[in-house]
Image (cartoon, rainbow, N blue to C red):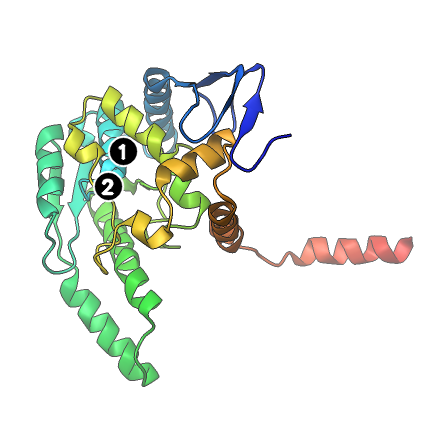
């Protein structure tokens, strides 16, 4: 009988949930510290590059890939993939600090490393004005979550303004792990025209980054919300490694952590779905069918 800490797979399995790239062959029980997965970062990267190239041919032939650059693993890997797919001349980086950003040097160094054109647009004045105007209109202090999500939404609006001006398409930089638990802002960093990393976990993104030859400082840059001073993992209460093993391989964490992950996924799953819309024609047709029964 399997317990909450252990799962057994006794057969080779070609894992296709995220699209591709796996051969899992396990003939032993494994737990958090003992598993054997062959993730082929070479194949994953090459196929993703081909997918990016094909997407642009069909949805923006000759357009630039416009990417919000933070210098962390996700924006670094996305930018590197786009450079490989389209050439550095067609990749445009946008750095968007909100006031003074202590780690802005990572973003600058990434753009220099990849040789891509980039601009820096500080959103602080827009953010401060928006907070003040909305607070005044509502005659109340905005919620903490509003102040946390607003910068991401302002950045996305900025990316689209840049994209429309330079002739581009906005590239989403979210990964599967973050999306699974809703750790992305709806219509903020969760938006975009295409998403190369949406089916890759955090550990897979890092593996691809290493295959692409990115310096380790970009791959292992500690992710944070950039506002409260805490890391993502501090805010979540569990590590991305634990999350990835659970959602990708079925390795069950402690019951408390499993419950937290499951609840976050259920609560935020709507973010990954298209906006619901009322369909008058289908509704009428269903009513007529029901009446005829």
**Is 232 displayed left or right of 201 in the figure?**
left
Assess disc 1: are there few (<14), some (14-19) or many (≥20) residues with their C-alpha within 10 Å of its C-alpha.
Answer: many
Tell me where residue 143 appears, x and y as whole percent.
34, 72
Along the line of sight, the residue nearer the viewer: 231 or 69: 231
Query: Does the CB distance between marks 2 and 1 fall below 8 Å?
Result: yes
| Residue 109 in view in this figure | yes
Residue 116 appears in which quarter of the rendering?
Answer: top left
Residue assigned mark 1 = 78
Residue assigned mark 2 = 67
Residue located 27% across and 37% down the image:
74
**Is 189 displayed left or right of 18 in the figure?**
left
Q: CA distance from mark 2 to mark 1?
A: 8 Å
**Is 162 displayed left or right of 53 in the figure?**
left
Tell me where residue 44 appears, x and y as whole percent.
37, 21
Along the line of sight, the residue nearer the viewer: 222 or 84: 222
Q: Which badge, 2 or 1, comes first in the chain's sequence? A: 2
What secondary structure is found at the residue carrying circle 1?
helix
Q: Is residue 38 above or below residue 191?
A: above
């Amino acid at each position: 009988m399997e317990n909450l800490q252990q799962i057994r797979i006794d057969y080779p399995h070609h894992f296709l949930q995220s699209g591709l790239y796996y051969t899992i062959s396990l003939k032993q029980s494994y737990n958090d510290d003992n598993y054997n997965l062959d993730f082929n970062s070479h194949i994953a990267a090459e196929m993703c590059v081909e997918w990016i190239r094909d997407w642009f041919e069909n949805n923006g032939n000759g357009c630039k890939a416009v990417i919000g650059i933070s210098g962390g693993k996700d924006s670094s890997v996305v930018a590197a993939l786009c450079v490989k797919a389209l050439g550095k001349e067609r990749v445009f980086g946008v750095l968007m600090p909100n006031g003074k950003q202590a780690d802005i040097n990572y973003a600058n160094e990434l753009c220099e490393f990849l040789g891509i054109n980039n601009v820096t647009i500080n959103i602080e004045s827009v953010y401060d004005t928006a907070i003040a105007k909305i607070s005044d209109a509502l005659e109340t202090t905005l919620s903490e979550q509003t102040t946390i999500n607003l910068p991401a939404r302002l950045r996305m609006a900025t990316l689209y303004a840049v994209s429309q001006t330079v002739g581009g398409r906005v590239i989403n930089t979210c990964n599967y792990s973050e999306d699974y638990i809703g750790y992305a802002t709806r219509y903020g960093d969760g938006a975009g025209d295409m998403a190369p990393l949406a089916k890759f976990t955090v550990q897979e993104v890092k593996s691809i980054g290493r295959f692409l030859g990115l310096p380790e400082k970009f791959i292992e840059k500690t992710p944070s919300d950039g506002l409260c001073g805490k890391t993502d993992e501090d805010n979540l209460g569990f590590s991305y490694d634990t999350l990835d093993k659970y959602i990708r391989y079925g390795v069950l964490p402690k019951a408390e952590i499993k419950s937290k992950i499951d609840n976050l996924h259920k609560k935020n799953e709507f973010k990954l779905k298209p906006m619901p819309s009322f369909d008058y024609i289908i509704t009428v047709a269903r009513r007529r069918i029901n009446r005829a029964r």
